[in-house]
Amino acid sequence: MEERRVIEVKKNILAANDEAADAFRAARAEEGTFFVDVMASPGAGKTTILLAIIAELRRRGVADLGVIEADLESDVDALKIKEAGVASVELNTRGVCHVEMGMVERAFAAFAGAAGRFDYLFLENIGNLVCPADFDTGAHTRVMLLSVPEGWDKVMKYPPMFAAVDALIVTKCDYLPLNDDFDMDRLKTEARRLNPDLNIFVTSARTGEGVPDLVDWLQSQRAAKVQG
Amino acid sequence: MEERRVIEVKKNILAANDEAADAFRAARAEEGTFFVDVMASPGAGKTTILLAIIAELRRRGVADLGVIEADLESDVDALKIKEAGVASVELNTRGVCHVEMGMVERAFAAFAGAAGRFDYLFLENIGNLVCPADFDTGAHTRVMLLSVPEGWDKVMKYPPMFAAVDALIVTKCDYLPLNDDFDMDRLKTEARRLNPDLNIFVTSARTGEGVPDLVDWLQSQRAAKVQG
């Protein structure tokens, strides 16, 4: 009974959220801002891979970059991004386990001159491999990270996230020699069973492996999905 | 408006959940079953440390052990526990991000002759460092894992979980040589700032480091909290 009420209210919230997400996505596309939602477990390396992507984009001459840093309470990651000299806004969910459109809209409005300012805008979502999968954040592309130390079999255990994203970024591949039970082939097979169009990138932010390929792909996605 | 309705309904659900949890906890204590809730991010090593704890308990002559294996959809971990010859029940949340009492009660009832059968019963909760903190599962003791590859700073980013548990089990310490930025002292300081009574165990299931201390503590907790 109570559970059914929650499900109904949640459905209404998700429908309103989807509508706001579509509007946000369209507005950013018109302005030439490509918006990427980055999701993963805690500690999978979201901030670190973002910094690697940003460094590679800068090497390629792309300078107009922004990051929305979502966290339950702290500003640890937001500070790391600021230290790299990247425009960032802290999105504090106050304990909420995912990011919704109202939060994205408020965070975006907090950038000075946000409209049209960015070529790329990233959302570092809450560290959570479950709940964020359900909530459209208005991004043009959704990616997830899976770090090698987490184990390949997470694809069996958290399928909704693998099914929801456009790309899987395997991170911390410098740990592979320590993880001879990490079955990369099975990970790829099972992930593509859930999501046949999934793009998969095998990376290490420490060695730089895989980052240029990932940035090539992001640039092609941007060209296909936003103007200018 | 919608959000406020969700919060109200959630409050009612949590109150009912707490009541059921108290009843479950009391019933198990009378039967001599010590119930432990194990929480962590995906891939922190919940199943692996459980298998190490179980092996150590068996070495000490404790044989009556059970595990409730919660998962969004799969039976990957339940199979690993079964392979070790441990009584286990699979608790499938069908995508729900945490475990509630109704699920625990149904899972417990699925053990043949559950009442009074176990000295120790473990719940491997959903891999999620956010949502399970809010839901009392009727356990006598709640523990969380943080694996070294996740990074010490997760204590800054996911404080509700660190505040909710009786013990923090740092796992995968065999990775420490690869993680010279893992600040164990700061982790301990910050965790105890959130939770002054927190017990902290530094472990590696691979090398066995820390597991006997952890099992000593579990046995002392059992002696204090359940009968017989």
Image (cartoon, coloured by chain):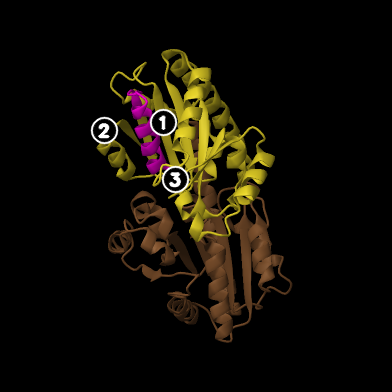
Chain colours: A brown, B yellow
The kind of secondary structure the magenta stretch mainly shows is helix
Q: Which residue is mark 3?
A: B204
Q: What's drawn in magenta, residue-wise?
A: B45-65
Question: Which chain is indicated by disc 1?
Answer: B
Marks 3 and 2, how far apart at CA = 22 Å
Indicate whether A152 appears above or below A58. Answer: above
Relative to B1, is B135 on the left or the right?
A: left
For badge 1, the amino acid type reads: Phe
The one nearer the camera, A212 or A165, is: A212
**Residue B71 image position (x, y, % from top left):** 38, 42
* Mark nearer the N terminus (3 vs 1): 1
Residue found 59% across the figure and 82% down from its top: A58
Q: The residue under label 2 is which amino acid type? A: Gly
Which of the numbered marks, if any, corresponds to residue B122? 1
Q: In the rendered view of the protein, which quadrant contains the C terminus of chain A?
A: bottom right
Q: From the top left corner, tell me how far across and down residue A100 is, in percent.
A: 58, 55
- What amino acid type should be assigned to the residue bearing mark 3? Ser
Q: Can residue B56 be found in the magenta stretch?
A: yes
Q: Which mark is residue B192?
A: none
In the displayed structure, B85 sits above or below A47; it is: above
